[in-house]
Image (tube, helix red, strand yellow):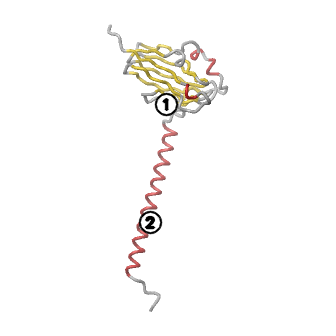
Amino acid sequence: MNSTVQDPFEERFHHAAQRHERAWLFISVAMIAVLFIAAVYLVVHDYGVVAKTARIYVDPDTPATLADFQGSGIKQTGPESYNVYEMARIWSWTPGTSTPITLPAGSHVTFYVTSGDVLHGFEIQGTSINLTAIPGVIGHVSYTFDKPGTYYIICNEYCGAGHQAMIGKIIITARTKA
């Protein structure tokens, strides 16, 4: 038997196998490219700290000394507009932990968030707010509270032994009829 003659079935089988291998290789490379592009987009374009940073200070203790972070931390900027200056410290939010933030429904709130010690996660349950509180960095995010109710501020970044108790409270009251 001549060794140079190939079986036609075997030749078709190898040709089909190569087609399948090329297809799966293309699919794998395309998936990796899509995941890479998505990751770069999220980090560079709009992922918490990168796009929503108001100020960065060399000394991480500086934000805690600013006048905005002193006192109640709530400033009315318009008829239904507020700025809330949140300071995270192990294991509390100021304001929010000992004294809840109380605002009327329809309030547009800009939160300015920083940390006085370690990384904290600033998340308000039931909203799209999720920001990282970093020492020396003041991040900001805005939200309009249309529905009355109680919203909880939680730390979603592990910050130590009392992390699970780091819960603040925002109370949105019903609008009063004038």
Please identify the quarter of the rendering in which residue 72 is found: top right
Left or right side of 133 for 145: left
Please identify the quarter of the rendering in which residue 113 is found: top right
Mark 2–mark 1 CB contact (< 8 Å): no
Which amino acid lies under the numbered mark 2 shown in the image of this protein? Glu
Residue lying at the far top in this picture: please name it.
178
| Crowd tier of the residue under label 2, counting other residues whose Cα lies within 10 Å: few below 14, some 14–19, many 20 or above | few
Residue 125 x/y as whole percent: 45, 28
Give 147 or 18, whichever is nearer the viewer. Answer: 147
Secondary structure of the residue carrying tag 2 is helix
Residue 132 x/y as whole percent: 55, 31
Real-space Cα distance between discs 2 and 1? 42 Å
User: Which residue occupies 58% across, 17% down?
Assistant: 69
Give 167 or 122, whichever is nearer the viewer. Answer: 167
Q: Earlier in the sequence, mark 2 or mark 1?
A: 2
Which amino acid lies under the numbered mark 1 shown in the image of this protein? Asn
Quadrant for the N terminus in the image: bottom left
Is 97 drawn above or below residue 12 in the view shown?
A: above
Mark 2 highlights which residue?
A: 21
Residue lying at the far left in this picture: please name it.
177
Residue 155 x/y as whole percent: 54, 28
Left or right side of 60 for 43: left
User: Which residue occupies 54% across, 16% down?
Assistant: 98
Residue lying at the far right in this picture: please name it.
59
Secondary structure of the residue carrying tag 1 is strand
Mark 1 highlights which residue?
A: 130
